[in-house]
Image: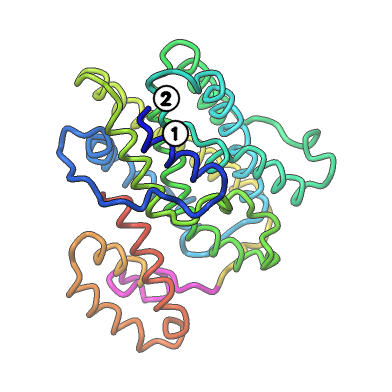
Amino acid sequence: MSEEKMETSANVSNGAKPAYEEKKAALSPEDLSEMLAAGTREVHEKAENTQFVKDFLRGRIRKELFKLGAVALYYTYTAMEEEIERNKDHPHFAPLYFPAELHRHEALASDLQYFYGPDWQSQISCSQATQRYVDRIHQVGQEDPVLLVAHAYTRYMGDLSGGQVLKKVAQRAMKLPPTGEGLEFYQFDAIHSAKAFKQLYRSRMNELELDEEVKKRLVGEAVKAFQFNMEVFEELEEIGKTIQEDVLDADMPVHGATGGDINKCPYYAAKLAASGGTAYACQLAMAVLRHPTGQVLFATWFAALAGLAAWYLM
């Protein structure tokens, strides 16, 4: 590793102001980050449109399902971070090893203790869909470690992007403490600029010495990772049908509140803006602002969700 890279890594890990806010390198379609973004765009869109995710983004949350989702994440990240530790010196993963900045299983343990109490470990179990995801992560880590890059990219980059929007939605809907209890998973204390860190991470991925065949396998593995996540979402949806619990609502405008016209929904407007339909999205925004429910929240949520959608479409 070059002296410049070592200095960057040290500055990130010791909690000092990050030194990775450098000029953005010109990207090409052959760069791994670009191949992953392009290769997972379709499946990412499908994951975004599962009912569980759509309800979450609308601020309609069942607390029991949220807790079960945190359980699934706990098992997933525990497996992934076990394999990352096993392979932290592997030449194809070492440049992406940022435990202090990224690792989530301890934060998830804190969240589960908040929701379930001190004996939380005796109250949770790994679901079938989550177990399939966990088994694949362990298989990759033990048999083909380079593919861990795809799983780390899929999870961590999403956590640093859309995850920050989901935190605000969950906090509001479930009336969680403003001090962050129950939502430590979404808090990255060692990262001072998510944008700059994501730029560093993608740059490190692009510098990995990988041939075209390996890059294509990584894209395929990233698609699998999204599919595993969708299976977990679908499993949660099925469980939700058996839970008799009031839906907690963050009082966010939803498609149904606009008379069934998705074009009047601010979430849809945000996505249009991120994908290039800026002028049209502005017209929709003006329409939403005529409604009292949209006036207070629109500005903040439009910006946040536009950022989320922009990451999806990169």
Q: Mark 2 belongs to which amino acid?
A: Phe
Image quarter of residue 108: top right
Marked residue nearer the N-terminal end (1 or 2): 2
Mark 1 residue element: helix
Q: Residue at x 42, y 85 (%)?
A: 295
Please determine whether, in this image, residue 49 is positioned above or below residue 92: below
Image quarter of residue 238: top right
Residue bounds of the magenta highlight: 251-265
Q: Mark 1 belongs to which amino acid?
A: Ala
Query: Is 252 covered by the magenta stretch?
Result: yes
The mark found on residue 93 in the picture is 2
* Whole-percent x, y for residue 136 in the image: 48, 20
Q: Nearer the viewer, residue 11 or 120?
A: 11
The residue tagged 1 is 152
Asked if labels 2 and 1 touch by Cβ distance under 8 angstroms, the answer is yes
Q: Residue at x 46, y 37 (%)?
A: 229
Q: Residues within 10 Å of mark 2 (few under 14, many from 20)?
A: many
Query: Is 32 covered by the magenta stretch?
Result: no
Please determine whether, in this image, residue 296 is positioned above or below residue 182: below
Left or right of 156? Residue 211 is left
* Whole-percent x, y for residue 34 in the image: 23, 39
Left or right of 17? Residue 33 is left
Residue farthest toward the top in the current orientation of the protein: 143
Image quarter of residue 7: top left
Mark 2 residue element: loop
